[in-house]
Image (tube, helix red, strand yellow):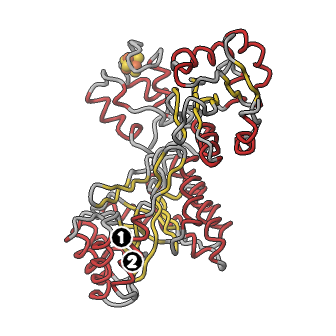
């Protein structure tokens, strides 16, 4: 049973020493009750109180990991329904499903294609997390497929089989390669055999059950039987119903219904008739609480938007993604190349840098410290103004890099023109395009300005 903030407060030292970062023990207790801090943040909790607070300090959703060759996919430890309440922590793992009835050569090619895929997004390298291998026949075929897949790509795995014996063969193959997979396929009828496997191989197991009260009973029994790492599949393969169930399960978990306090797994391809709609179904799963997402088929056109969506949902909304301020070379600029200025919000930086690069005219890009805000936001907040721009020009010795002394400012802040001219009297300030996409055409006229 979860403890209230006042109950937690009575178990704290009540010295208000502030070492936890909060002004009073009561404030810390309220945060702990809301699962927004860790008990270890207070160094003075007695052992006796710690035992009593264990329940309150446990994350409402257990962290479950799968791993291979140093790579991990983790899900759980979430504490809020909505990102703006705090943040989401563990990005859902994206897995691509392969079937064991394919020849080993084909499986290897498919696995390698997934493993080799990476895409750069605002300075980050994004990749698919792993593979799912599904059994369609006997144990030998399944084991052979797992071996082939892992031979081509040593990635985290989800093993899918309805028959526990078949699953056992797949697990043997995974163990030989040092992989710790998630095993999927247990139901109310078969869970005990899967528990034996999960315990023997030390792996997490998923359980599929459509009724949440039955699922809660099952997870309690699985836990009692000795398996702590559990993943849930509510069984709905209809988008609105799946959304309702995923949301309900998350809410119950955050309300400390411990039996449902586990990550969820989703199979978006099973929810749509048209494969073209898989991306939409997967986007719903990522946004609404799946911890493991198994995709049917792989194509960069499907995966890239999902990786970008996931990245955006799982970044801290209070900490914009930023690049380091400084003077960047785009292409191989010379002293005669155009000089642009912008802010250090990653998406702004990469939008401008990509357009300068795509224009075919190398350039210099001066990135000012605007605390990670985009141009207009930073200007409105007083973080992108004439003083800061002039300071960046001087600190980066820009006048030693270019000989034309022309600085292009974003069109959205043309209002700064006069002030920058006052701060940089030796420079000619040019108002550039409002949108980065217009930079290539701007470069054609830049040297006439
Ligand atoms: Fe209270 Fe512990 Fe925080 Fe100190 S560190 S204020 S004792 S909760």
Q: Secondary structure at mark 2?
A: helix
The answer to whether residue 173 of the structure is visible from this angle is yes
Q: Earlier in the sequence, mark 2 or mark 1?
A: 2
The quarter in which the N terminus is drawn is top left
Q: Tell me where residue 417 appears, x and y as whole percent.
A: 76, 19
Quadrant location of ligand 1?
Answer: top left
Q: Residue at x 34, y 84 (%)?
A: 105
Q: Secondary structure at mark 1?
A: strand
10 Å crowding of disc 1: few (<14), some (14-19), many (20+):
many
- Identify residue for label 1: 183
When the figure is inspected, residue 103 is found, relative to residue 37, above or below; the finding is below
Q: Quadrant of residue 270?
A: bottom right
Q: Is residue 112 above or below residue 315?
A: below
Give the distance between the C-alpha atoms of the residues marked 2 and 1, in whole angstroms.
Answer: 23 Å
Left or right of residue 201: residue 24: right
Compared to 308, does 275 lie above or below? below
The structure residue drawn at horizontal position 30% and vertical position 79%, both measured from the top left corner, is 148
Q: Which residue is mark 2?
A: 109
Residue 268 point in image, percent of width and height = 57, 69
Q: Residue at x 36, y 65 (%)?
A: 221
Do labels 2 and 1 touch, CB within 8 Å? Answer: no
Nearer-the-camera pick, 169 or 327: 327
Residue 217 location, quadrant: bottom left
Q: Give the left or right position of residue 359, taking residue 392 as reference.
A: right
Q: Position of residue 364 (x, y in %)?
A: 57, 32
> How many numbered marks are there?
2
Whole-percent x, y for residue 102 in the image: 40, 87
Foreground tag (2 vs 1): 2
Q: Is residue 269 above or below residue 9?
A: below
């Amino acid at each position: 049973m979860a403890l209230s903030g006042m109950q937690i407060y009575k178990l704290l030292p009540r010295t208000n020493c502030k070492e936890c970062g909060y002004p009073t023990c009561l404030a810390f207790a309220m945060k702990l009750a809301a699962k927004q801090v860790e008990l270890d943040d207070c160094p003075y909790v007695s052992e006796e109180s710690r035992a009593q607070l264990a329940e309150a300090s446990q994350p409402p959703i257990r962290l479950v990991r799968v791993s291979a060759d140093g790579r991990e996919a983790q899900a759980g430890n979430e504490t809020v329904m909505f990102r703006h309440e705090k943040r989401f922590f563990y990005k859902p793992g994206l897995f691509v499903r392969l079937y064991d009835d394919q020849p080993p050569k084909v499986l290897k090619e498919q696995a390698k294609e997934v493993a080799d895929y990476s895409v750069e997004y605002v300075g980050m390298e994004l990749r698919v997390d792993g593979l799912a291998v599904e059994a369609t026949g006997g144990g030998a075929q399944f084991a052979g497929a797992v071996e082939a897949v892992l031979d081509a790509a040593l990635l985290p795995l989800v093993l899918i089989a309805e028959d526990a014996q078949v699953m056992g063969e797949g697990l043997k193959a995974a163990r030989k390669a040092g992989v710790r997979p998630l095993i999927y396929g247990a139901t109310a009828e078969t869970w005990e055999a899967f528990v034996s496997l999960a315990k023997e191989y030390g792996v997490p197991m998923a359980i599929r059950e459509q009724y949440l009260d039955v699922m809660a009973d099952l997870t309690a029994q699985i836990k009692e039987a000795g398996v702590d790492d559990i993943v849930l599949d509510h069984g709905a393969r209809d988008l609105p119903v799946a959304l309702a169930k995923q949301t309900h399960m998350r809410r119950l978990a955050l309300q400390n219904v411990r039996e449902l306090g586990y990550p969820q797994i989703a199979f978006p391809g099973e929810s749509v008739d048209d494969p073209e709609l898989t991306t939409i179904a997967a986007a719903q799963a990522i946004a609404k609480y799946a911890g493991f997402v198994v995709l049917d088929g792989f194509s960069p056109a499907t995966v890239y938007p999902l990786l970008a969506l996931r990245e955006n949902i799982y970044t801290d909304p209070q900490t914009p993604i930023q690049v380091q301020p400084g003077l960047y070379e785009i292409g191989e600029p010379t002293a005669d190349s155009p000089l642009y200025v912008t802010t250090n919000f990653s998406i702004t930086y990469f939008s401008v840098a990509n357009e300068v690069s795509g224009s075919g005219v190398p350039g210099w890009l001066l990135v000012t410290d605007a605390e990670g805000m985009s141009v207009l936001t930073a200007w409105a907040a007083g973080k992108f103004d004439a003083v800061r721009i002039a300071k960046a020009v001087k600190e980066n010795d820009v006048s030693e890099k270019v000989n034309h002394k022309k600085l292009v400012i974003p069109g959205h802040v043309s209002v700064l023109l006069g002030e920058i001219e006052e701060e940089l009297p030796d420079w000619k300030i040019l108002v550039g395009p409002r949108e980065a996409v217009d930079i290539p055409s701007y470069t054609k006229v830049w040297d006439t300005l």
